[in-house]
Amino acid sequence: MAYGNNITEILYGGDYNPEQWPEEIWQEDMRMLKKAHINMVTLNVFSWAALQPDENTYCFDKLDRIMEFVRENGLKVCMATSTGAHPAWMAKRHPDILRTDADGKKRKFGSRHNSCPNSPTYRLYAARLASELAKRYKDYDNIVAWHISNEFGGECHCENCEKAFREWLKEKYGTIEEMNRCFYTDFWGHTFYDWDEVVLPNLLSEHMEWDGQEKTMFQGISLDYRRFMSDSMMECFKLEYDAIKKEMPDVPITTNLMGFFKLLDYQKWAKYMDFISWDSYPQPTDGPAVTALNHDLMRGIKEQQSFVLMEQTPSVTNWHPYNRLKRPGEMRLLSLQAAAHGADAIQFFQIRRGIGACEKYHGAVIDHAGRDDTRVFREVTALGEELQTLGDAFLEGRTPSETAIVFDWDNWWAVEYSAGPSVRMKYLDAIRDYYAAAFEQNIPVDIVGVEDDISSYKVVIAPLLYMTKTGYADKIRAFVEQGGTFITTYFSGIVEEHDLVLPGGYPGELKDILGIWVEENDALPEGEENAFIYEGNQYPADVLCDLMHLEGGAKSISVYEKDFYQGTPVLTKNHYGQGTAYYVGTRSNAEFYRHFLKNIFQEAGVEPVMVTPEGVEAAVRENEKGRTLFLLNHAVDSKQVVLDRNYVDLVSKKEYRAGEKLELKGKDVVILSAR
Ligand code: GLA
Ligand code: ZN
């Protein structure tokens, strides 16, 4: 389990910064945390400058007092390493730690999450600090996990990074000829004869701004830069990881991720993390499906294991353009939605609101009033009580999914680096189209990577799988042959992992499985649409229309209604082996995806968790204690849910019979155990 096997309760707490406060306040904090049923704190997230005043001096006095104090008060600790923001003196004396932007501008000291990941200074001192901390605090048995740095991200274009990039390429390609082949440097005569001729792809070299987006003229090298930057930061993570493991081999280590964060290949990172934790800050306009999808991605990157909700705001953020308050009940709803999708711990940023700098208006458990009778504090307390009652009922519980959606970071980068066919083609839109349709029908979905085993699923959906990595088509082929249902969409199967087109007609190696070949792709500008009719309903064809031909036994289910390709297939079905493969040659609207997937799920025998009224989400976790059902009313009005079997409410202990109606108030959640 996330926080280790001996944890038998839901850990509840968050980022706590007592170093910003006089010690008298600490006592008051403890009184309030106890009242709120908070049982853990994340400490030491941003204290590097305080802990290390120069190259060779460490001063842990204050942290010692904090650690003692927190232990005396019975709190568990998620211990951060503080390396998310380097000290000012370090930047002044060792400027290699400062990043260089994509336009060649060298940064000065300031902000955070901004150390060059290939800086020898950063690597040396970050790993050393992690090691010093681990040596000092290894006997604290209330440390339940280590939290390395904070929200790794960004990128660097400095000379150290450029040198490291060349090494990375050498290691990957072995010969310059192979690199030239993969980068397709015969185009525009960009052939390299020496590794040192390679420069970073950025706004000074191969990149340009194009319709507000950064695009590249050579996708191969740009993709490799993304991979290299992600690897460079992962290397920093690993250096600290190893330093801590040496002292405390049994305590799990994480770093806080950010859901669909484009710059880091979290599927790769997850292999080196003991458990996944992530920070969820949905925009007020994000619907429940968007948040659920993020949770499912975070569960999916590490073999569908449970994770930690490392941060969420109890009430409000400070960095959205409009920092709307979470309405009464909303914080509880979002917390329990995280639990429903795999979270074993619920934590906040932050415990006490600071009084200065840019996060002073960010929500906190204890706000500026410092009182325990605020709306937010009361809601935090009520949730704490509820989580305590739930105990370990669903801890480590798995999501029983029969449907998987494929998501791949390389593909994300490649689709959006692609010069053509359309700037409107967004990978996440394509993922969300299908996910939302399943979500609204209470169909549990696993988000899987291309390396994951898919043989146990009934339905696998790979939206906009532009890049088909070597061997992936075989995995899909075997899945469909053995009876699986596979769906893919427009602009899929086009390139291999270097972004080189697989010639012979699109979708490359997937053609035989789908029984089609695509000849052209028509990109529609905003406001222009084609259409198609599916089971009597007309739906829009938007963004991209693939013009395709049937081959072998595939059937056309629907055709385009307009334009010179009117009457040609847009939606096809092919029986292949024991299974079925569908191709959806365009982007449509939410009604279409709901309609289409409803049929697919029925045909493939995929059952919803439960049938609920609109706005009510039903999600399940299963562990050795049984099946826990979460009913979450995302709507503001009350809803009646007809229960499918006997249940007991895990909090109120109320019993329900199958067929009984359960009344769920607006924004309310009930957690039931199947009997
Ligand atoms: C991030 C960071 C925190 C804090 C919050 C504010 O998630 O990790 O340090 O800045 O955002 O929302
Ligand atoms: Zn750098």
Image (cartoon, helix red, strand yellow):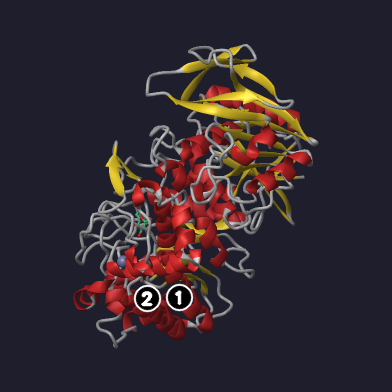
Quadrant including the C terminus? top right
- Is residue 55 shown to the viewer in this render? yes
Q: Which residue is mark 1?
A: 239
Q: Is mark 1 within 8 Å of ligand 2?
A: no
Instruction: Give whichever of 388, 195 is nearer the camera.
Output: 195
- Is residue 400 shown to the viewer in this render? no
Q: Which residue type carries mark 2? A: Arg
Farthest-out residue, bottom: 56
Residue 605 in the image: state x and y as whole percent. Answer: 76, 33
Numbered label attached to residue 123: 2
Kindly check if marks 1 and 2 are in contact, taking CB atoms under 8 A apart as contact. yes
Quadrant including the N terminus? bottom right
Report ligand 2 position as a quadrant: bottom left
How busy is the neighbourhood of tag 2: few (under 14 within 10 Å), some, or many (20 plus)? many
Residue 61 in the image: state x and y as whole percent. Answer: 33, 84
Q: Which residue type carries mark 1? A: Leu
Q: Quadrant of residue 200?
A: bottom left
Check the image and report above or below for 297 versus 53: above
